[in-house]
Image (cartoon, rainbow, N blue to C red):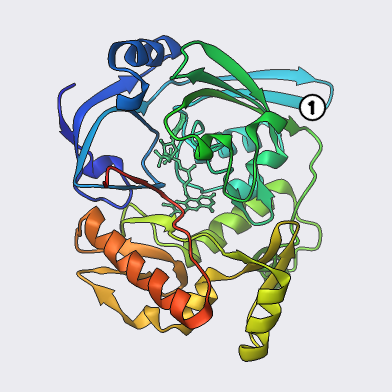
Amino acid sequence: MTSLNLKSFNTLSVEAVADQVEIVASEDDIIKLAQDHGSTRLLVLGEGSNVLLAPAVHRVVCLMRSRGIAVDEIGSRIKVTVSAGENWHQLVMWTLERGYYGLENLALIPGSAGAAPVQNIGAYGVELADVLSHVDVVDLERGGCETFTNAQCGFGYRDSLFKRTPGRYAITQVTLDLSKEPGVVAAYPDLQEEFEREGVIAPTPEQVAAAVTRVRQTKLPDPTLTPNAGSFFKNPVVTAHQAARLQQSFAQLKVYPTEAGVKLSAAQLIDWAGWKERNSHGVRVWPRQPLVLVNELGSSGADILQFAAAIQSDIADRYGVRLEIEPDVIGFS
Ligand SMILES: Cc1cc2nc3c(=O)[nH]c(=O)nc-3n(C[C@H](O)[C@H](O)[C@H](O)COP(=O)(O)OP(=O)(O)OC[C@H]3O[C@@H](n4cnc5c(N)ncnc54)[C@H](O)[C@@H]3O)c2cc1C
């Protein structure tokens, strides 16, 4: 394929003309593209739900569209190997229909299976790292295929080896370690509220997936109607000392102690700073979830980046906290 506008290939719906676009349907396809163009020219893209693209993307965009799911049953454990181009939510529903449990809390997350390890997708108390066995990749720099175990993926909060080495690897297959025995994770407050309202005491995995879907549909904008890339900022992690100092000034500050430090709610800080009332050319924060930026009037990637920078600078001034952008920002110099 020659140059193409990626507007309908990114959920923020920004205009972004790529030098060249190629469909990748197999491991051989991506190996050949790396040989023909060199790894630095390639941009591997799934469904474009976690990227912010510049108006011109001077790269060979490789749309990962390989399909296929294979199952290996070992007693009550199920290994599900899925090709990179499969849709994540459809995979979650496919596993649930067969009684393979573990993915229910990750229902309705947009995007492809191949991108799921990149930022270690997570929601409602579960992240991919909890259920991932291993990942098959093509090393675009060195050529050749490799397998990374869960530990070798270097997972963290919205982070992985793949996120830290952009452009190095194309993930071709993801293998999940699921179970036939339901092990429900339902402690997350939003889910608890749902189950209390419905009088459900011991939810099944199917009920968890349904509750997650309802909560997400209530809180998050549907990208097919209101362009967005999900959370635009990561929740900041600060030292215990910094969190305690902030709490002295802001008693209502939400704090979540983690192994890496104290996690704050970026949504709360953005809300307190008054950003729900502001917008620029149709770019604004989503009132029901201020972590999400929406692009209602077709603004450019540059406009969105400018709006995000204004939020970052305001939050840094008010709270001394640096907000990090979550989606991959691509093509800006
Ligand atoms: C409404 C909405 C809600 C969301 N909610 C959540 C949520 O709850 N939790 C969460 O974690 N995320 C969430 N996201 C973010 C997004 O859904 C995930 O990050 C998803 O995994 C991105 O998949 P994708 O195929 O669209 O990736 P893309 O946006 O196409 O790519 C994202 C990054 O991964 C790289 N990449 C893509 N495919 C591959 C591959 N096969 N091999 C190597 N690198 C690859 C790309 O180069 C890019 O750097 C949300 C997004 C939206 C729009």
Q: Is residue 264 above or below residue 128?
A: below
Q: Position of residue 90 (x, y in %)?
A: 51, 37
Per the image, the residue denoted by label 1 is 77
Q: Quadrant of the rendered structure where residue 98 is?
A: top right
The answer to whether residue 4 is seen in the rendering is yes
Q: In the depicted view, which residue is nearer to us: 27 or 210?
A: 27
Neighbours of disc 1 within 10 Å: few (<14), some (14-19), many (20+)? some
| Relative horizontal placement of residue 310, taking residue 317 as reference (left or right) | left
Q: In the depicted view, which residue is nearer to us: 109 or 155?
A: 155
Residue at the image point whose x is 67% and y is 83% from the top: 245
Residue at the image point whose x is 20% and y is 43% from the top: 16
Q: Quadrant of the rendered structure where residue 76 is?
A: top right
Looking at the rendered structure, the secondary structure element under dot 1 is strand
Residue at the image point whose x is 49% and y is 19% from the top: 139
Q: Is residue 313 above or below residue 176?
A: below
| Relative horizontal placement of residue 88, taking residue 81 as reference (left or right) | left
Q: Amino acid at mark 1?
A: Arg
Residue at the image point whose x is 79% and y is 42% from the top: 182
Q: Position of residue 185 (x, y in %)?
A: 75, 53
Q: Quadrant of the N terminus?
A: top left
The answer to whether residue 102 is seen in the rendering is no
Q: Position of residue 3 (x, y in %)?
A: 15, 29
| Relative horizontal placement of residue 6, taking residue 139 as reference (left or right) | left
Residue that protrudes farthest toward the right in the picture: 75
Q: Position of residue 307 (x, y in %)?
A: 30, 67
Q: Is residue 123 above or below residue 139?
A: below
Q: In the depicted view, which residue is nearer to us: 13 or 209?
A: 13
| Relative horizontal placement of residue 185, taking residue 110 as reference (left or right) | right
Q: So how many labels did they put on this image?
A: 1
Q: In the depicted view, which residue is nearer to us: 205 or 186?
A: 186
